[in-house]
Image (cartoon, rainbow, N blue to C red):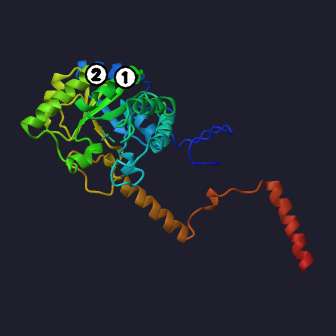
Amino acid sequence: MRTGSIRLAGGALEDNVSLTPIGGPRRKITSATLREKKLHRDSITCLTAYDYATARLVDEAGIDVVLVGDSLAMTMLGYDNTLSVTVDEMLHHVRAVHRGVKDAWLVADMPYGSYHETVEDAVHNAARFVKEGGVEAVKMEGGEKRVDVIRRVIDAEIPVAGHIGLTPQSVNMMGGYKVQGKTLQAIEQLMRDAVALDRAGVACIYLEGIPREVATMITAEVETPTIGIGAGPDCDGQVLVFHDLVNLTFNPPAKFVRRYGDASALISQAVEAFKSDVARGQFPSDAESYHLPKDTQVALETVLQRKRAMQR
Ligand code: KIV
């Protein structure tokens, strides 16, 4: 099958996808890199990716961590929330992302229900992400109350990324997507959650939807690198959902989102221009068409002339 991108078969490399990583060669990012970065106060960058093309662009731009978030339930699959996405649906995307990532540390979300029943289930599902998806870590939401299952997954040699604060898989328990950690009691619980994850040996802790002041305290308290989303600038790193970054979400952005591009406008303009060109007979042009070799064209002309003569 021909596409407009790189053709490996047939020799020619078309030049619309770069093979050269932007910014030159980088070393492979691991969980140790994240710890080094925390020590040196060097900010960690993380973006979500859900398919080969975006994974490749994010990786080649030098982002440290690529997260196949269960946010793909909304961004890619059009669900209302993250709750219904399955391990198999996640793995379909994880495998595509894995093929596009070379240097970044690759993490995938364990979806709701895949680690909430038995520990055996949790370890089995986490191992599927490693064996079938090629991830280097799995992300699991929850603090103190999930720490036993998280330990068992780590014991099975699978690095875990923690995730506390506004944890979308708890949307029904939280009564909506609300900023967490706004009372003294809630702050205390969040600190206990962070310390429990730190002691369990998670590779990093995602802090979502909490006041800046609380994220700052947690980041100072734990040795584990923290990666914030809606948690202020004092975390060890920052993550955004790719679709938020480039305006592909069809909803007004949350307060913490900064749009760095407008893929929605770009795609709409391209689609409308294609539609208009086809309607006006302006696409494809002769230069965008294949032509017969000269000798075949001459032979064909002769055949057609003979046919026309016979019809007269
Ligand atoms: O699912 C996701 O994309 C996430 C990030 C927002 C941290 O969990």
Q: Quadrant of the C terminus?
A: bottom right
Q: Residues within 10 Å of mark 1 (few under 14, many from 20)?
A: many
Say which element carries label 1.
helix
Residue 188 or 52: which is nearer the viewer? 188
> Which residue matches tag 1?
154
In this picture, residue 219 sits left or right of residue 22: left
Q: How many marks?
A: 2
Q: Where in the figure is residue 145, as x and y percent of width and height? A: 25, 32
Q: Earlier in the sequence, mark 2 or mark 1?
A: 1
Label number found at residue 200: 2
Q: Residue furthest front?
A: 118
Do the numbered discs 2 and 1 sit on residues whose CB atoms are within 8 Å? yes
Residue 173 or 284: which is nearer the viewer? 173
In this picture, residue 134 sits left or right of residue 14: left
Q: In this picture, is 204 found above or below 87? A: above
Q: In this picture, is 291 found above or below 108? A: below
Q: Where in the figure is residue 46, as x and y percent of width and height? A: 33, 34
User: What residue is shown at x 87% (from left), y 65% (from top)?
Assistant: 302
Q: Where in the figure is residue 173, as x and y percent of width and height? A: 23, 46
Label number found at residue 228: none
User: Residue 291's image quarter?
Assistant: bottom right
In this picture, residue 188 sits left or right of residue 105: left
